[in-house]
Amino acid sequence: LARADTAAFFEPKALEANGYELRVTAAYDVATRDNFDRPIFLIAQQLTGLTAHQFMLQADLRLRITPALALQCVLPFVMRELDGRSYGLQVSQTQQLASQRFSISSSGLADPLLAVSYRFLRNPPWAAYGELGATFPIDDDPGSPVFPSRVPLGTGQHLLFAGLGASMREPVRLSVA
C-alpha cells in the first residue's frame, strides 16, 4: 500500500484517453551523519563524519493498453557521492595512522519498477483498481569488501507489491489507496 498513491490509475481522470503519460521528476538530497552508534554497512571502518549527496532524474511512463488495463515503467537515473573522514587506524600500541578524507561516487540506472494496473470498477463518479508490480535490483556492489570503490546505485532488494485503490471524481475530487 505504500506504493498505491503512484499507481497508473490512482488520480481521478488518469489515463482516460488511449495513449500514454510521461512524467519526469528531478530531486537532489543531502544527508550528513556524525553519530556512528549504529553501524554503516557500506563502510566497515570507524568514521568521524559522512555526507551523502544524491541527484535523481526519474522517468515514469504510464501506458494505457485498454480502458481498464495500464502498464507503468519507472526508470530512476541517479548520481551518488559520499564524502567522509575515517577515524584513523590503531596499528600497534605505539603506532596509529592518521584519519583520512575520502570521496567515492557513481552514477547510472538504479532499481527500475514495472507494474500493471487493472481498473475493475468504472462507474462515475467512482473508480477502483488493483495493481501488481515489482522492482528489479540492478546494482548493489560497492566494488570491494574492505573499503568501497563506488557507491551502490541500487538497493539489492527485489520488491514485489500488490495493491488496491479507489477514487471519486465528482463532486469532490478524492482518491484513497
Image: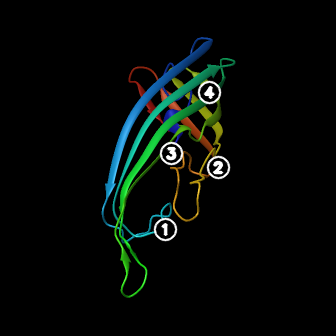
- Farthest bottom residue? 93
Give the residue pinned by disc 4. Answer: 121
Q: Which mark is residue 64?
A: none
Instruction: Where is residue 19? Give x, y as percent.
Output: 61, 12
> Which residue type does callout 2 highlight?
His
Which is nearer the N-term, disc 3 or disc 4? 3
> Which residue type does callout 1 highlight?
Ala
Q: Is residue 59 in view from this perspective? A: yes
- Quadrant of the rendered structure where residue 90 is? bottom left
Residue located at (58% from left, 11% from top): 17
Give the residue pinned by disc 3. Answer: 2
Element class at badge 2: loop
Picture layout, residue 152 above or below residue 88: above
Element class at badge 4: strand
Picture layout, residue 56 above or below residue 1: above
Q: Which one is closest to the eye, mark 3 or mark 4? A: 3
Instruction: Where is residue 165? Give x, y as percent.
Output: 54, 36
Which is nearer the N-term, disc 2 or disc 1? 1
Decide if residue 112 is on the left or right side of residue 50.
right
Residue located at (53% from left, 53% from top): 149
Q: CB of mark 2 within 8 Å of CB of mark 1?
A: no
Instruction: Where is residue 41? Give x, y as percent.
Output: 50, 64
Which is nearer the N-term, disc 1 or disc 3? 3
Q: CB of mark 1 within 8 Å of CB of mark 3?
A: no
Instruction: Where is residue 84? Give x, y as percent.
Output: 36, 57
- Distance between the Cα atoms at labels 3 and 2? 15 Å
Q: Which one is closest to the eye, mark 1 or mark 3? A: 1
Decide if residue 76 is on the left or right side of residue 115.
left
Which is nearer the N-term, disc 3 or disc 2? 3
Give the residue pinned by disc 2. Answer: 158
- Distance between the Cα atoms at labels 2 and 1? 24 Å
Give the residue pinned by disc 1. Answer: 44
